[in-house]
Amino acid sequence: MSSAPRRLLSYPQRCRNLRRRIAALAAWRALRCPCSIFQSSHSVNYAAVEKPPRGHRKTHPAAPCIHRFLQRWGYVVLLTAVAGTPLAPARAAEGDISRPSASVRIVDGVYLLDSVARIELTEPVRAALDSGVALTFVWEVEIGRERGWWWPEAEVAYVTQRYRLEYHDLSLQYLVTNLNTGERRSFSRLPTALDFIGQLIGFPIVDRVLLDDPGRHTGYVRLRLEHSTLPLPLRPAALFSAAWYLETDWRAWSFE
């Protein structure tokens, strides 16, 4: 019985098979010892290679870079996190804005709001003011209408009253500007200027005709120091420092 003739391979096919065998051999040697494919010119004495201790874990190549970054900037991240933590008791001891009172009355078909809050500046804010930094205080008033327990309140009106406080070194006067009307007033003492800003008397908020059912409407008012008007170098400090967090909680009242 004669065997079938052996099929001869062409030259490109033989080259392709040879490359496949070389790749397979290199892969087998890499699995056996990863360093063998780079040290094929001489044999390696595996007995002389120091074995890692038990429990040793391979570190990521980027671990040294991360370690150096934490050594250099880790304390900055920690201080930033601590500075940004709300510290209500400490802030109240240094300076704060008391929760405002709120009462409304109707004059000529318009609801007028009377609200009073006491402002005490912290040392960093006072130092910035004496250095020529203008401070902007904002009264925010919002009126919402109840829509049922499963729906949030609908906003009926939202009005603001802004005051800018400045210190003039030449005249030794504190200047308060009503940013809504442009009216200016000067004071020789800072507590007097802060008392003027903390009193919102007879402020029109909404017309009576817009409240179809006053019993279903609720008003909210608060006073805060606006950070967006500060100079750019001071904004990071105002964002992460509790000393610049001068803001009251919302005071709510109901319409009758």
Image: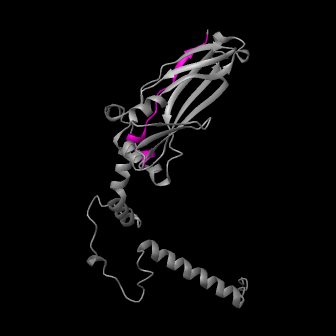
User: From where the camera sits, is residue 59 visible?
Assistant: no
Q: Where is residue 195 in the image (x, y as percent from the top left)?
A: 44, 29
User: From where the camera sits, is residue 110 visible?
Assistant: yes
For the C terminus, give its image quadrant.
Answer: top right
Q: Which residue is drawn at 48% across and 40% down?
A: 175
Q: Does the magenta stretch include residue 251?
A: yes
Q: Position of residue 62 (x, y in %)?
A: 41, 65
Q: In this view, does 11 lie above or below 105?
A: below
Residue 240 found in image quarter: top left
Q: Is residue 31 above or below residue 9?
A: above
Q: Does the magenta stretch include residue 106?
A: no
In this rendering, position of residue 12 left or right of residue 50 = right
| Numbered disc total | 0
Q: Where is residue 204 in the image (x, y as percent from the top left)?
A: 63, 22
Q: Is residue 124 above or below residue 220?
A: below
For the N terminus, give its image quadrant.
Answer: bottom right
Name of the residue lying farthest toward the front: 171
Along the line of sight, which residue is nearer the eye, 29 or 72?
A: 72
Q: Is residue 222 above or below residue 65?
A: above
Along the line of sight, which residue is nearer the eye, 189 or 112?
A: 189
Q: Residue at x 58, y 32 (%)?
A: 161
Q: Position of residue 44 (x, y in %)?
A: 34, 82
Residue 243 found in image quarter: top left
Q: Residue at x 50, y 47 (%)?
A: 230
Residue 91 found in image quarter: top left
Along the line of sight, which residue is nearer the eye, 21 or 79?
A: 79
Q: Give the range drawn in magenta.
A: 237-255
Coloration mode = one colour
